[in-house]
Image (cartoon, helix red, strand yellow):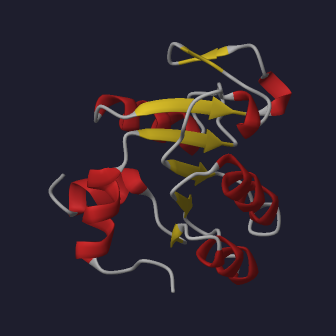
Amino acid sequence: MPLTSDDELTALLTETEAIAVIGASDRPDRASNRVMKFLQGKGFRVFPVNPTIAGEQIHGETVVGDLSEIGEPVDMVDIFRNSEAAGEAVDQAIAAGAKSVWMQLGVVNDEAAARAEAAGLKVVMDKCPAQEMPRLGM
């Protein structure tokens, strides 16, 4: 079952250090851009992932085209893709050895969540860490 309680979300965010943002955008008006900056401001190491703009910079970090290109462990994969495309991102997170996947607001993929949980990953769906952290007092 995806994490939903305040205690579960707080524990997950507390144990997370490195976050890959799949679907990161270089456009300041996009939610993924604002959330990445928010997470950096909270002290997380954030890796932007977007094949369309690989090699460019977002908030001082070089964008990679695929999760496998990061080259260091990632605790959480924050998914800014539609619900259908989230399945591929979850499979990449499993292959990369991530500890959790966080599907953003409006992103729900029960089949992908079940695959992630079966592989031992914690799952959050239809929530935004940039909204949850202030609400949780973090």
Outermost residue, bottom side = 1
The residue depicted at 50 percent of the width and 18 percent of the height is 59
- Left or right of 130: which side holds 116? right
Residue 127 point in image, percent of width and height: 47, 66
Residue at 73% across, 74% down: 112
Does residue 35 sit above or below 14 in this rendering?
above
Tell me where residue 49 appears, x and y as whole percent. 69, 34
* In the image, residue 62 above or below residue 41: above
- Residue at 56% x, 28% y is 28
Residue situated furthest left in the rendering: 137
Q: Is residue 45 above or below residue 2?
A: above
Residue at 75% of width from left, 52% of height from top?
A: 92
> How far across and how far down the image is residue 104, in percent?
56, 60
**Looking at the image, which is closer to me, 34 or 4?**
4
All told, the count of numbered labels is 0
Q: Nearer the viewer, residue 40 or 100?
A: 100
Q: Is residue 38 left or right of residue 1?
A: left
Q: x%, y% of residue 62? A: 63, 16
Q: Quadrant of residue 8?
A: bottom left
